[in-house]
Image (cartoon, rainbow, N blue to C red):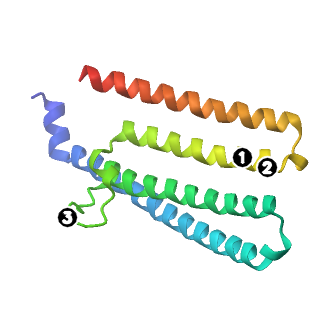
Amino acid sequence: MNRLDTFVQKMGLGRFVFFSRWVQAPLYLGLIGAQCVYVFVFIRELIHLVLHASALDEANIMLGVLGLIDVVMVANLLVMVIVGGYDIFVSRLNIDKHPDKPEWLDHVNAGTMKIKLAVSLIGISSIHLLKTFINPVHVSDSAVMWQVIIHLTFVVSALLMALTDRLMTEKH
């Protein structure tokens, strides 16, 4: 061991760098706050849908339900990022014996987390695209085209990430 390594070890720099992962904890708390906002939005939209259901046609009811599904999918995405990200990057959750432990948490790593997030974004994008197709009145043709291009970009990106992850895990 050279003098610099000895000095760094004595100074505890490695411990300090390792401890720095806790700087991310407030970020995850902020995402929990954002999830609370989505709960509020969901309740507000649900109340609006129920109160106005008799005056809405089937297409508008479907749009309202798709809006609720969209909120739920974003909330699910937040749960994946909060739980998975905290478990991977900050500290183990130590919930192995908890009956409600998500199954996906057993085999999540940074690579699989990216793929799960990409697939979630595809789902959210699909909902937005479906809403556009159901109610195309207020959307220009170019806006629809860009939504389709963005959606396909998400799909291709997710496929490439999954392929890359598979190739990397096969070699190891």
The location of residue 147, given as percent across then percent down, is: 74, 37
Tell me if 132 is positioned left or right of 172 in this view: right
The location of residue 44, given as percent across then percent down, is: 69, 74
The location of residue 47, given as percent across then percent down, is: 70, 77
Q: Residues within 10 Å of mark 1 (few under 14, many from 20)?
A: some
Determine which residue is flagged by label 2: 134
Determine which residue is flagged by label 1: 130
Q: Quadrant of residue 94?
A: bottom left
Q: In the rendered structure, which amino acid carries the disc numbered 1?
A: Leu
Q: Residue at 38% across / 39% down in the picture? A: 112
User: Is mark 1 in CB contact (under 8 Å) with mark 3?
Assistant: no
Disc with the residue nearer the chain's start (1 vs 3): 3
User: Is mark 1 in CB contact (under 8 Å) with mark 2?
Assistant: yes
* Looking at the image, residue 66 lies above or below residue 109: below
**Measured Cα–Cα span from mark 2 to mark 3:** 45 Å
* Label annotation for residue 66: none
Q: Residues within 10 Å of mark 3 (few under 14, many from 20)?
A: few
Numbered disc 3: secondary structure: loop
Depth check, mark 1 against mark 3: the one in front is: 1
Numbered disc total: 3
Q: In the displayed orientation, state which residue is furthest to the left.
A: 1
Disc with the residue nearer the chain's start (2 vs 3): 3
* Label annotation for residue 97: 3
* Looking at the image, residue 43 lies above or below residue 97: below
